Image (cartoon, rainbow, N blue to C red):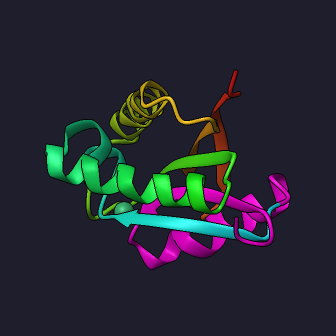
Amino acid sequence: MAEGKFATLIACMDGRVQVPLSEWMREHLQVDYVDTITEAGPEKIVTQGTEAQIAAIREKIEVSVNLHGSANLVMSAHHDCGGNPVSKEQHLKELAQSVEAIQSWEYPVRIMGVWVNEKWEVELIHDKPYH
Ligand SMILES: [Zn+2]
């Protein structure tokens, strides 16, 4: 097991979201490191991606959970997303569906769904403890 406390982040590749999400997680989850899985519009990939795209995401989650002992996974969506240019309502719908999909994969982790707003602030929308 790697030293230090890790958490897992699924985020857009958009450079504007990485720092706020990472800082929010280190502060709220008291972790040392954030393993970041990036896609362009990740909530679209998790809900509508190909089998191969989903398998690639799961493989990375497994590295973070199994090798780094992550117990917290944050699924994120954000304002002004070029990879998934839909309304805020649709982003939030896909975020909720993504959280449900990730829950169905049954990793031993707490799953959070967050929205990065137009001020690049992180809003916690879903919080599903592992049980
Ligand atoms: Zn994006």
As drawn, the residue found furthest toward the front would be 1
Q: Residue at x 20, y 39 (%)?
A: 48
Quadrant showing the N terminus: bottom right
- 26 vs 42: above or below: below
How far from the left and from the top, in percent, is residue 106? 50, 29
Lateral position of residue 127 relative to residue 60, left or right: right
Q: Nearer the viewer, residue 46 or 93?
A: 46
Q: Residue at x 67, y 41 (%)?
A: 124
How far from the left and from the top, in percent, is residue 111? 61, 37
- 125 vs 50: above or below: above
Residue 3 visible in this rendered orientation of the protein: yes
- 76 vs 107: above or below: below
Quadrant showing the C terminus: top right
Specify whether residue 20 is painted magenta: yes
Q: Nearer the viewer, residue 9 or 126?
A: 9
Q: Nearer the viewer, residue 2 or 50?
A: 2
Lateral position of residue 41 relative to residue 7, left or right: left
Residue 78 visible in this rendered orientation of the protein: no
Which image quadrant shows ligand 1? bottom left
How far from the left and from the top, in percent, is residue 90? 33, 35
Number of numbered discs on residues: 0
Lateral position of residue 71 relative to residue 39, left or right: right
Specify whether residue 12 is painted magenta: yes
Residue range highlighted in magenta: 1-30
Q: Nearer the viewer, residue 61 or 15?
A: 61
Q: Residue at x 85, y 58 (%)?
A: 30
As drawn, the residue found furthest toward the top would be 131
How far from the left and from the top, in percent, is residue 78? 46, 55
